[in-house]
Image (cartoon, helix red, strand yellow):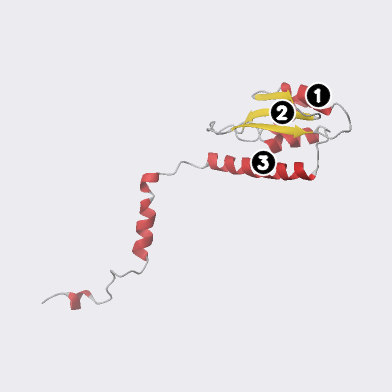
Amino acid sequence: MKRALARDEASGAHSHISPQPGSIKRREIRFTKMPPGQAEKAADLLAGMELLQVALGTRERCLTVSYDLVDYTYEGLERALRNLGYHLDNSLYCKIVRAVVYFTEETQLKNIKEPARLIKKSNEVYIKAYQHHPHGDHDDTPIELREDR
């Protein structure tokens, strides 16, 4: 039950997106001192989730997770753990790292969802802008006065 809840919370509605280069992420989740043993319990919980690699971190009270951004987000994983009663480190350093990671992953997901731009036709935008912009080639003299008769 907890694994299903964690999976639903952690994975976003990103299943329609195909994997992209650079979308594999490796992040560290830090827990508070109290209650003890949170990292080990969270590792056991998350280990059963598909397409998510979990290992105890190199530091005490840390967990290392590797995932594809198409399948999970750091924000989703942390939200799932919080909803299940885990206490994450809330130091200033962790808050800053968390904000930067949330922003970069959200931006990368938006960029992945955007359709590929046609680079070869991008010059048409500049051509149209130039045509509407007044420049030296424009002559206000009526056509009948410009013609030789």
Q: Is residue 77 visible?
A: yes
Q: Which residue is mark 3?
A: 101
Label disc, if present, on residue 90 of the rendered structure: none
Report the disc number at residue 40: 1
Hey, which residue is sitting farthest right in the picture?
35
Q: Identify the residue shown where x is 73% and y is 45%.
A: 96
Q: Amino acid at mark 2?
A: Thr
Residue at 67% of width from left, 25% of height from top? 52
Q: Could you say whether the residue bearing mark 1 is in a helix, strand or loop?
A: helix
Q: Which is more N-terminal, label 2 or label 1?
A: 1
Q: CA separation, marks 1 and 2?
A: 11 Å
59 vs 18, nearest the viewer: 59
Q: Residue at x 36, y 65 (%)?
A: 132
Which amino acid is tagged 1?
A: Glu
In the structure shown, which secondary structural element does the residue marked by tag 2 occupy?
strand
The amino acid marked with disc number 3 is: Val
Q: Position of residue 108 (x, y in %)?
A: 58, 41
Task: Check if mark 2's residue and mark 3's residue have beta carbons within 8 Å.
Answer: no
Give the quadrant of residue 38.
top right
Q: Badge 1 local density, few (<14 within 10 Å), some, or many (20+)?
A: some
